[in-house]
Image: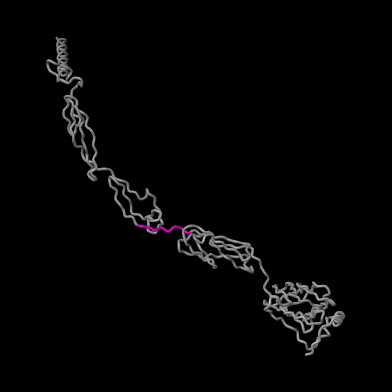
Amino acid sequence: MKKIKLGVAACAAVILALSNVTIMTSAAVDSDAMPKAAVASSKSDASQIIVDTKTAAPGEDVTVALSLKNNPGITGMVLRISYDSTALKLKLVEDKWSNLMYSQTLDVNPYKIMWFDGLNNVKTNGEVCNFTFTVNENAALKDYDIEVSYSEGDICDNLEQDVHFDMVSGKITVKNPTVDVTGVTLTPAKKELKIGETVTLTSKITPDNATDKKVTYKSSNEKIATVDANGKVTAIAEGSADITATTADGKYTATSKITVVHVHNLVKVAKKDATCTENGNIEYYKCEKDGAMFADAEGKKALTESDIVIKAVAHKFGDWNITLAATETAEGVEERVCGDCGKKETRSIPKLNPGDDKPTTDNPGGDKPATDNPGDDKPATDDNPGTGSSASLSAALGALALGAAVVMKKKK
C-alpha cells in the first residue's frame, strides 16, 4: 500500500473541496488505505480520540461528544463517525473547535469531519464536536456503537509526520423511558417479635412502573434487630429498633418499627390452702424473669396479687379457762386456745371485792348476793325489817289486813 502524507498543500485542497455536498477524503491518501478502528490502550498517557457513551429511550434525542486526550500536537485531521442508521438518525453536529469542517449532508454514514490549522501544532484537548442523534421509535432496546476511525495520513503534524491516536468508540444504550420514583412504603409498619423470631418486610415503590425499584434496608439498632438485603428482620434482644427502606435515588424512605418483646419463663406454683395464721394461694404460673403471674401456662391471662390470694381463716378458739384465780389483792388470768393452730389468747380477771365469792369460769369476777336493795347487804329479819324482800312482804300483808278491817266496820 502506497503511503502519502497529508501535507499542508493537500489540506488546503481539501478545504476547497468542502463546497461539495460531502467532504472529500484527503488527496494524499491512497484509495486502498484502511481506516484505523477503535483500539483499547493499556497506557494511561496514550493519545486518544474518544466518543461518549450515553443512554436514551426510543423517540428521544441524545448527544455524544467527540474529544481528544493527551494530544501530542497536530496540524490537521480527518475523522469518520459510523453508526447504525436503522436505529439512529443524525440530527445535529456542533463544532467546538474553530476551522472545523464536516459533511454538509447529515444523512452521510460514515459522517466525516476535518480540521486544519495551517503550520501550527495544536495540542488542545477536550471536546472537538458534539453529535446529536434521534433514537427511532421502533429501535430495539440494546446498545448501538458510535465508532470513530481514521486512515493512514489523515492525522499529521506541521512536519508532515503521521500522528497516532487510539480510537475509543462510544455507544448509545437504548432503554425504555425512565420513570422516576415518587414514594415507598414498608409493611408491616410495626411488628412484635420474640427473640429468635423473623419477619420479612415488603417494600412497595410508587409508581408501579418506576424504572428503578431497588431499595436498601438498615436497622437503627442491630443489637436489637438485624435486617438483610431482602428485608428479612431477625429479633436479637428485647427492645425496639426502626428498620428503614431507602430508594435507590436516596430521595424516599419508609420505616417499620420492630419491638422485640419479653419472653416469659413460666413456672407452675401449686395451690396452697389458707390457715388461721397465713394466707394461701390458688394455682398459678409465675415468670422467673420479671415475676409476672398468669392463670395459664401460655401466659395469656394475667393475674394480680389479689387474684391469687386466699385469705387466712378465723381462729377456732375453745372456752376460757382460768389459769390464775383472782384475789382481793391481785387480778387473775384466763386463756383460750385455737384448736387449729394452737394460738392462745389471754385476758385478765378483775380483783375480788371483800366478801365476793371466788370467781368461777362462768363468773370470773365473783357474784355478789342478790337483794332488792343493792345498798343493803344484810338479810331482812324481825329485828331488822330493813328494805329486804321479807320486810316488803310483811308491810303488804299488814296493809291488806287493815283494809279488810275497815270494810267490815262499815258493814256493821
* Quarter occupied by residue 83: bottom right
Q: For residue 16, say whether it is visible.
A: yes
Q: Which stretch is magenta?
A: 260-267
Please state if 133 lies on the left or on the right of 17 as rendered: left
Quarter of the C terminus within the rendering: top left
Colour scheme employed for the rendering of this structure = one colour
Q: Between residues 392 and 27, which one lies in front from this camera angle?
A: 27
Residue 261 falls inside the magenta stretch: yes
142 vs 129, left or right, is left
**Image height of 114 relative to 341, above or below:** below
Residue 321: image x %, image y %?
A: 19, 37
Q: Can you give x and y, in whole percent of width and height, for residue 397 in the image? A: 15, 17
Q: Is residue 324 left or right of residue 27?
A: left
Q: Nearer the viewer, residue 50 or 323?
A: 50
For residue 20, say whether it is visible. Answer: no
Q: Position of residue 297 (x, y in %)?
A: 37, 58
The answer to which of 12 and 407 lies nearer the viewer is 12
Total marks shown come to 0
| Quarter containing the N terminus | bottom right
Q: Is residue 251 left or right of residue 370?
A: right
Looking at the image, the residue that sits furthest to the bottom is 1
